[in-house]
Amino acid sequence: MTPEQKAEIEAARAQSHQTRRATAPGMETHLYTAYPVLDHGFIRVIDYMGDDSAITQAARVSYGRGTKAVSNDEGLIRYLMRHWHSTPFEMCEIKLHVKLPVFVARQWIRHRTANVNEYSARYSILDREFYIPAADDLAAQSTVNNQGRGAALSGEEAARVLDWLRDDATRAYDHYEAMISQDGQQGLARELARMNLPANIYTQWYWKVDLHNLFHFLRLRADAHAQMEIRVYAEAICAVVKDWVPFAYAAFEDYRLGGVSLSARGVECLRRMLAGEEVTQESSGMSKGEWREFMGVING
Ligand SMILES: Cc1cc2nc3c(=O)[nH]c(=O)nc-3n(C[C@H](O)[C@H](O)[C@H](O)COP(=O)(O)OP(=O)(O)OC[C@H]3O[C@@H](n4cnc5c(N)ncnc54)[C@H](O)[C@@H]3O)c2cc1C
């Protein structure tokens, strides 16, 4: 972030406004602050609407703030989450400014139930900023999961990969700059020159989403199986949401993030196990992969 951008954020943080709207004290402390993610990325909250009470207020369709007692609110929110009564959670909204590598943005944008406005690389020139993984994060293709990584690459190979990532990004950006330059030439349009840039270049967007759909995003992307480069963004968002809507976040952590859903066959196997039967993959009726996942749930 440039000093000018930091100054802009500080100026925004220095201002405050009076309002009749519900504000969440925990969220007010996060407002505008940019939290670093990966080597050049960040998330920062631009705005939000609602708090835990907004959820219970909508669920009760009440005239006032809806709060009867704090413990009632907590219990109701847990009940709503447990029973997939999701629309009250849609009453809360969050607007984030996110800076992220393009290959992460491609996964993120698949979450269609959000409003997005991305930095225009037709209009503006992209910064010379590329995601270069830390050496520890360079891993080999997983042998058990086609969609994942396994052991860390060894020293020499890791060094070679890092060199290639840096060199290729630098060369591609040098050519991008040379193509758009109007110094002694016409200069290629930015909308065309950008096709030369690699997928680890950073982009930025404003991303607005309601709490229900945000939880759906976080459940998939803060999960241990999500790619690390998007998971770290999801985790940074989780830390903010926890302070924004503490009851809703606690219920989400309990029922969704930390909870599991079992198939009817899984429940049947569990009951047989609890009754003392020694159930095996063969006698479970599950495939090898499903059994492995089931045992992962049971054994933690
Ligand atoms: C581990 C993992 C691996 C993945 N691998 C791949 C992959 O290999 N290839 C790939 O293409 N994608 C992949 N995805 C993306 C995935 O298929 C979803 O597109 C992504 O997670 C967004 O989920 P969503 O559609 O539920 O979210 P959202 O788009 O936010 O939608 C939320 C919900 O709204 C409803 N909805 C929204 N739009 C529609 C619609 N047009 N029609 C019907 N219902 C709708 C659905 O109920 C949906 O669940 C992967 C995701 C994960 C987490």
Image (cartoon, grey):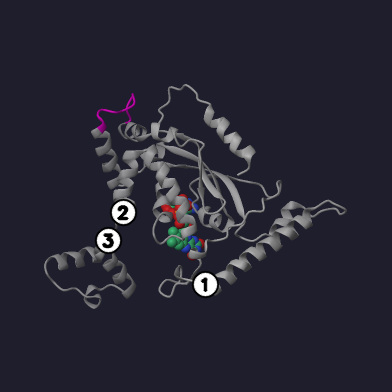
Q: Nearer the viewer, residue 155 or 28?
A: 155
Percent from the top left, x then y, of residue 187?
A: 82, 53
Residue 6 seen: yes
Q: How many marks?
A: 3
Q: Residue at x 24, y 78 (%)?
A: 282
Q: Is residue 109 left or right of residue 74?
A: right
Q: Residue at x 75, y 60 (%)?
A: 175
Percent from the top left, x then y, of residue 206?
A: 56, 43
Q: Nearer the viewer, residue 247 or 155?
A: 155
The residue pinned by badge 2 equals 258
Q: Nearer the viewer, mark 3 or mark 2?
A: 2
Neighbours of disc 2 within 10 Å: few (<14), some (14-19), many (20+):
few
Query: Which SS class for mark 1?
Result: helix
Alpha carbon separation for disc pair 3 and 2: 13 Å
Q: Determine whether 296 is above or below 222 in the image.
A: below
Neighbours of disc 1 within 10 Å: few (<14), some (14-19), many (20+):
few
Q: Earlier in the sequence, mark 3 or mark 1?
A: 1
Percent from the top left, x then y, of residue 182?
A: 83, 51
Chief SS of the magenta region: loop
Query: Which SS class for mark 2?
Result: loop
The residue pinned by badge 1 equals 155
- Give the residues drawn in magenta, as a range: 61-70
Residue sitting farthest toward the right: 184
Q: Tell me the amino acid under the disc marked 2.
A: Gly
Query: Which SS class for mark 3?
Result: loop
The residue pinned by badge 3 equals 262
